[in-house]
Image: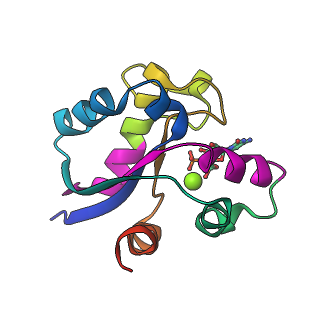
Amino acid sequence: MSNLEQTLSIIKPDAVERNLEDKIKTMFKNEGFKIVKEKKIKLEKTDAEKFYKVHETKPFYNDLCEYLSSGPIVVMILEKTGAVLDNRRLMGATDPKNAEDGTIRKEFGLSIDKNSVHGSDSIDNAKIEINFFFNN
Ligand code: CDP
Ligand code: MG
């Protein structure tokens, strides 16, 4: 038996800027995701640094945090059976060049950094990330 799960999704600044919000939400809905909660916000860089703390030793960390806080983003809780893995599958590979046809990053991603969406990578991280944006 598989379980109903929730995962955190972010439509990143490059996609919001290009007005892709509705198209991306349609892709989620077509794959059976329910958007349980959503909000459009703009992060401070310090918020982005907290959110991406897991990457703090990576060479791209500073640019990543600058970028995520560079413009409005749409943060959503997505729900369906197997949501975490199914969202990762629908997003496609981190680098849009390697993403498969039909994935969000293949359709819309511009580059490895401007890759249009974030999605939690595990059930535990989904809980932490949902809490980060929605439980305060
Ligand atoms: O987002 P995803 O889980 O697929 O990738 P990640 O390895 O957790 O990296 C987080 C984010 O950092 C990516 O989505 C990219 O926006 C960015 N990144 C980057 O700018 N350069 C890299 N070499 C790797 C990741
Ligand atoms: Mg990740």
Decide whether residue 71 is among the magenta residues: yes
The residue shown at (67%, 68%) is 53
The residue shown at (76%, 46%) is 63
Residue 110 left/right relative to 129? right
Q: Which of the pair 68/60 is nearer the observer? A: 68
The residue shown at (27%, 30%) is 22
- What percent of the width, then of the height, locates residue 30? 18, 33
Residue 5 left/right relative to 132? left
- What percent of the width, then of the height, locates residue 8? 38, 58
- What percent of the width, then of the height, locates residue 23? 29, 26
Q: Which of the pair 86/72 is nearer the observer? A: 72
Q: Which of the pair 115/83 is nearer the observer? A: 115
- Above or below: residue 29 compared with residue 83: above
Quarter of the displayed picture in which ligand 1 can be seen: top right
Q: Give the image quarter of residue 52.
A: bottom right
- Above or below: residue 76 compared with residue 106: below
Decide whether residue 91 is among the magenta residues: no
The residue shown at (61%, 33%) is 114
- Above or below: residue 104 compared with residue 64: above
Q: Give the image quarter of residue 97.
A: top right
- What percent of the width, then of the height, locates residue 127? 39, 73
Residue 100 visible in the snapshot: no
| Quarter the N terminus occupies | bottom left
State the scheme by which the image is colored. Answer: rainbow
| Quarter the C terminus occupies | bottom left
Residue 73 visible in the snapshot: yes
Q: Which residues are magenta?
A: 59-88
- Above or below: residue 38 compared with residue 135: above
Q: How many marks?
A: 0
Residue 25 left/right relative to 109? left
